[in-house]
Image: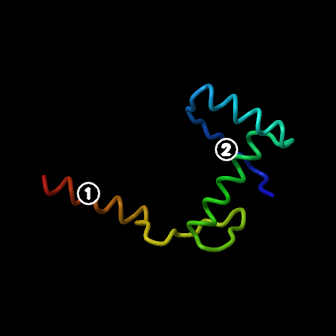
Amino acid sequence: METRTARLTILIDPNKKAVFEEVCLRDDLTPSQVVRRLIRTYIEQRLGRPWKPGERPELPGAPSKRKASDQASRAKKAR
């Protein structure tokens, strides 16, 4: 289990939030537990394999941060 935490703030329709919280309550889960599970499932679907906490893999087909900044620099120079 992860030991450090970070905050994720989202905007959601109030009615959808109320229904989500009620469903979580009926399942005896907190909304945070459900969102963490959804995020982990999404990560593993994108990786195509199980993910371990602390792992920072490159996603298939995603540009690296360096490549993205290089492209931005080249675009500025072209103007």
Q: Pick the residue in front: 5 or 42.
A: 42
| Disc 1/disc 2 C-alpha distance (Å) | 30 Å
User: Does 42 sit left or right of 54 as displayed?
Assistant: left
Of labels 1 and 2, earlier in sequence is 2
Within 10 Å of the Cα at label 1, are there few (<14), some (14-19), or many (20+) other Cα atoms?
Answer: few
Res 54 → quadrant:
bottom right
Res 66 → quadrant:
bottom left
Q: Position of residue 36 (x, y in %)?
A: 71, 50
Within 10 Å of the Cα at label 2, are there few (<14), some (14-19), or many (20+) other Cα atoms?
Answer: few
Q: Which of pointers 1 and 2 indicates the residue nearer the eye?
A: 2
Mark 2: amino acid: Ala
Name the residue carrying label 2: 6
> Which residue corresponds to the image point at 62% horizontal and 32% vertical from the top-left?
16
Q: Residue furthest left?
A: 79
> Which residue corresponds to the image point at 12% horizontal and 52% vertical from the top-left?
79
Name the residue carrying label 1: 73
21 is higher (above) or lower (below) than 51: above
